[in-house]
Image (cartoon, rainbow, N blue to C red):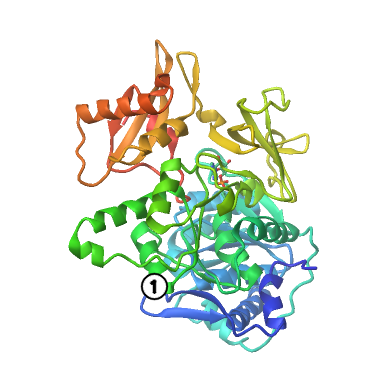
Amino acid sequence: HLNCAAELLDRWVAQGQGERPCVMGFSADGKHELRWSYAQLQAKVDAIAHVLVQDLGVVPGNRVLLRGANTPQLAACWLAVMKVGAIAVSTMPLLRATELVRIIDKAQISHALCDSRLAQELVLARSQRPLLRELCHFNSKGEAGLEQRAARYLGQPFEAVRTAAQDIALIAFTSGTTGVPKGTMHAHRDVMAICRCWPPHCLRATAQDVFIGSPPLAFTFGLGGLLLFPLSVGASTVLLEKTSPPDLEAAIAHWRATICFTAPTSYRAMTIEREVRAQSAQGAKAQPDLSSLRKCVSAGEALPAATRARWKALTGLELIDGIGATEMLHIFISHDEANARPGATGKPIPGYQACILDDDGEPVPPGQLGRLAVKGPTGCRYLADERQGQYVIKGWNVTGDAYVQDPDGYFIYQARTDDMIISGGYNIAGPEVESALLLHPAVAECGVVGVPDDERGQLVKAVVVLKPGVTASAERARELQDFVKAAIAPYKYPRLIEFADSLPRTDTGKLQRFRLSQSR
Ligand code: 3UK
């Protein structure tokens, strides 16, 4: 029985499988490839663990902040934090000093490991917070750098601290855009539980698989998909700093990746890149080769049917959708390729239960709109936050998502409960209107929100990004409106349409709807 997340790595070496490829990526200067075997990664993790304990004075239970883009070295740091029995607090690379200060205060951070290329904001944060005692940089030239210190311990095994299954392994912060960020605590047993629940049923990866994708390790979607799940089956993983859609496509081809994790918007963008290239003779020849892919996972936002259909037409692969949440650590409703249903997220994965509740907390029958509630081996434990009682109600985790269940038990996403549009007395889910718009061949991306209106309460407004080469006009807007009226109930059509070059998104790939409803 595994009681420490670091055993996900160590057990392969103990079983004589240390020579297997484990983590890959590019060096900090981008000039050469890194390919570390399980044994090489373990040697680095052990050396970093010695630095944490002997040089930096980390004791079990200390909270260690991690800051860096996805790289093999960041993965080594995360595993070293597990191995010394400390708590990993991974942070998004784009965070500024003020946001880092809030996390330092909230999580009582005493130590930090930071990529030297992202040092500035953390150094600034630390100058205001003596609580953060020790800050050590990796990818740095100085003698006090992490690699330079670790070199002194190379070859000295580190015996993992004997953590208990219920000891906290990580604190993940939600990407809350307003207010104080919420830290969610997850134990070592939660880390093990997510490796046991979703991957064997929906992904079925093998040791031969090569994982790749865009979500940061600071986002639990990325931590699971790009580190924990590959380690749990003895596979290898590619950790990339650059993950724009063309970068991701090129990397899939370069590393012959077999399993991809990214957000719906990224699958859409890769599809469009390829459509555009296919239109020129030269571009068609330069298409990155995606034929190594065998499984593609989508999460973070609802997956529109059109995105699923176009990815399938392009690659022959059925996307695997899954809804997860930082509060739940990973995915809890999903499906495998054989059970994909366009427009539905799927069914609760083995180990989890889900139901849909009305405003009084009573379950609703199939077909009726309500709030999604889930329970399973993982669950929400906010770090000192009065909002705990709003998320966990009578043992159920209430996610804040509006869902309906179809007669076959599939869960169909509607919208975030706070994002439901109420117009002329009708409840309208923005994502449903977005899915309809995305079926139109001229639409690349869109976001649908409610804007205040004296007469109807709210008006449905769509912000539309057109495909390259398509021009915006009043006629085009009318054409899209008619298209939506023909595709779904006509009262849902966007009475307002705005064209834009891009949509505001978070670094986890989510549309920032509140920014679309503000007048632009
Ligand atoms: C939304 C989805 C429809 C939904 C996450 C996989 O996204 C993750 O965590 P966050 O805390 O956000 C949670 C919220 O995002 N959402 C996520 N996936 C889907 N909506 N379909 C989906 N497939 O509103 C949810 O409440 O950032 C996703 C694994 C780990 C994660 N942390």
Residue that appears at 61% across and 53% down: 172
Q: Quadrant of the C terminus?
A: top left
Residue that appears at 48% across and 50% down: 508
Q: Is residue 97 left or right of residue 47?
A: left
Which of these two is toward me, 34 or 204?
A: 204
Count of marks overlaid on the render: 1
Q: Position of residue 218 (x, y in %)?
A: 55, 57
Residue that appears at 71% across and 72% down: 7
Say above or below: 275 vs 88: above
Q: Position of residue 380 (x, y in %)?
A: 69, 45
Kind of element beneath mark 1: helix
The image quadrant that residue 464 belongs to is top left
Which of these two is toward me, 405 or 158?
A: 405
The residue under label 1 is: 254
Residue that appears at 37% across and 39% down: 438
Q: Is residue 339 visible?
A: yes
Say above or below: 356 vs 266: above
Q: Say what amino acid the circle numbered 1 marks.
A: His
Q: Quadrant of the N terminus?
A: bottom right
